[in-house]
Amino acid sequence: MAKTNRIEEIPPDQMTPEQTKVFEKVAEARGRLPTPYKIWIHSAEVAAVMEKLGSFLNNESSLSTREVELVVCMCANRWEAKYVWESHVKHALKAGWGIEVFDAISKGEQPHLENARERAVYDLAKTAMEARDEGPQEVFDRSVELLGRNGIAEVLTTIGYFTSVAIGMKLHFGSSKK
């Protein structure tokens, strides 16, 4: 059975004033309306909050671009979101990651990460997405030491934001990564 695109785009001339305001803000900041916003724009309030959060995570967070892309790809892999995975592996490679990291992640294997801070980001994200309890104390303590409490908050928020992206894209495009 063929997969369908379930995104229903709203033509700009049919948007409510609230939707128009968000559309213009996102388009100004990003040059276009990225695909997840085509889902969220149906609730102007959701789109506005997600735009503010996404802009923060991508431009103002204490996390590096490499760290953000690592977490995004982990979320895409976790939710088997092909669209997000393919898009963000490309971004990660441009940020300097080697493909072997994402080959390992896609196979459910632990990637080799030499940078202690990036390892902390990976371990914290993996623990947050997979642990059935609070996870190992060592992972938390190392995260506090290397990322700070603000870094922990930003990793967790990145997971939440991009989990929403991954699930939304998977639901609307109907395809899985595997």
Image: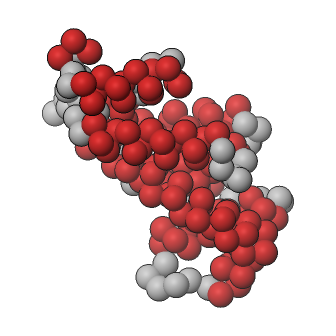
Asked which quadrant contains residue 132, the reply is: bottom left
Q: Residue at x 24, y 39 (%)?
A: 43
Q: Is residue 107 left or right of residue 150?
A: left
Q: How many numbered dots are placed on residues in this image?
A: 0
Asked which quadrant contains residue 55, the reply is: top right
Q: Residue at x 45, y 51 (%)?
A: 161
Q: Residue 30 at x, y = what percent? A: 52, 24
Q: Is residue 1 left or right of residue 117?
A: left
Q: Residue at x 46, y 49 (%)?
A: 162
Q: Residue at x 24, y 24 (%)?
A: 17
Q: Residue 120 at x, y = what percent? A: 72, 67
Q: Is residue 124 left or right of residue 62?
A: left
**Vertical placement of residue 175 versus 105, above or below:** above
**Vertical placement of residue 72 versus 25, above or below:** below
Q: Residue 28 at x, y = what percent? A: 50, 20
Looking at this rendering, what residue extends furthest in the front direction?
A: 17
Q: Residue 62 at x, y = what percent? A: 71, 53
Would residue 82 be visible to someone looking at this image?
no
Q: Is residue 112 left or right of residue 153?
A: right
Would residue 7 be visible to someone looking at this image?
yes
Q: Nearer the viewer, residue 48 or 157?
A: 48
Q: Nearer the viewer, residue 21 or 83?
A: 21
